[in-house]
Image (tube, rainbow, N blue to C red):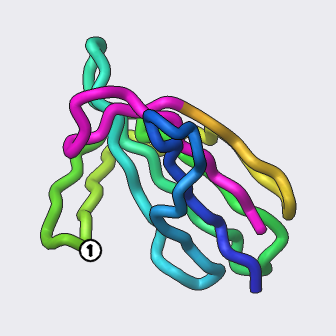
Amino acid sequence: MAPLELEAQHPRTKEWVKIGEVKPGDRPGSISDNTPQGRQIYLFSCKDDDSGAIIYRSKFGTDVDLSNTVRSVSNLTGFETVKELKKGESYEMSVKTDQSSESRRIKFTHK
């Protein structure tokens, strides 16, 4: 089964560095984006049948880091689909996470 791979672009070398992956059946991954307009929360997961992957944005929600590997996301108003990926497709976006002082390019690829 193919994973959805998450990579970040190194700010100096511009090389893509793998930072995580989600496989079919895994719990969704998440990443935050802190913008001047407010905080956005993105969830990403593989479809259970391994036919693709989906990236969602929270319409209004909160997230809490419970540990280095677990984040709890509460959402009362649902999610909107940002992008659906088929095998071999990628999607790039820029985010400024809690751990970063600058925005960075990230890339989702369904392998």
- 60 left or right of 13 in image: left
Q: Residue at x 25, y 72 (%)?
A: 70
- Rendering coords of residue 86 (x, y %): 84, 58
Name the residue nearer the viewer: 81 or 104.
104
- The span shown in magenta is 94-111
Point out residue 64 in the picture as x, y percentages from the top left corner. Answer: 16, 56
Q: Crowding at label 1, few (<14), some or many (≥20) Cα neighbours within 10 Å?
A: few
Residue at left 59%, top 50%? 16
Where, by quadrant of the figure, is residue 46 drawn? Answer: bottom right
Residue 17 or residue 63, whichever sits in front: 17
Of residues 57 and 69, the one nearer the viewer is 69
Which residue of the protein is positioned furthest toward the front in this rendering? 13
Placement of 96 over or under 36, stated as above or below:
below
Q: Residue at x 61, y 46 (%)?
A: 107
Query: Please, which residue is most extreme toward the top here?
Result: 36
- Location of residue 22 with respect to 33 vertically, above or below: below
Is residue 86 toward the left or the right of residue 17 in the image?
right
Is residue 71 positioned above or below 56 on the image? below
Say which residue label 1 marks. Answer: 69
Q: Quadrant of residue 45?
A: bottom right
Q: Nearer the viewer, residue 73 or 76?
A: 73
Q: Amino acid at mark 1?
A: Thr
What secondary structure is found at the residue carrying circle 1?
A: loop
Q: Dividing the image into 4 quarters, which one contains the C terminus? A: bottom right
Which quadrant of the figure contains the N terminus? bottom right
Q: Position of residue 90 (x, y in %)?
A: 75, 48
**Quarter of the image holding residue 52?**
bottom right
Q: Is residue 88 left or right of residue 10?
A: right
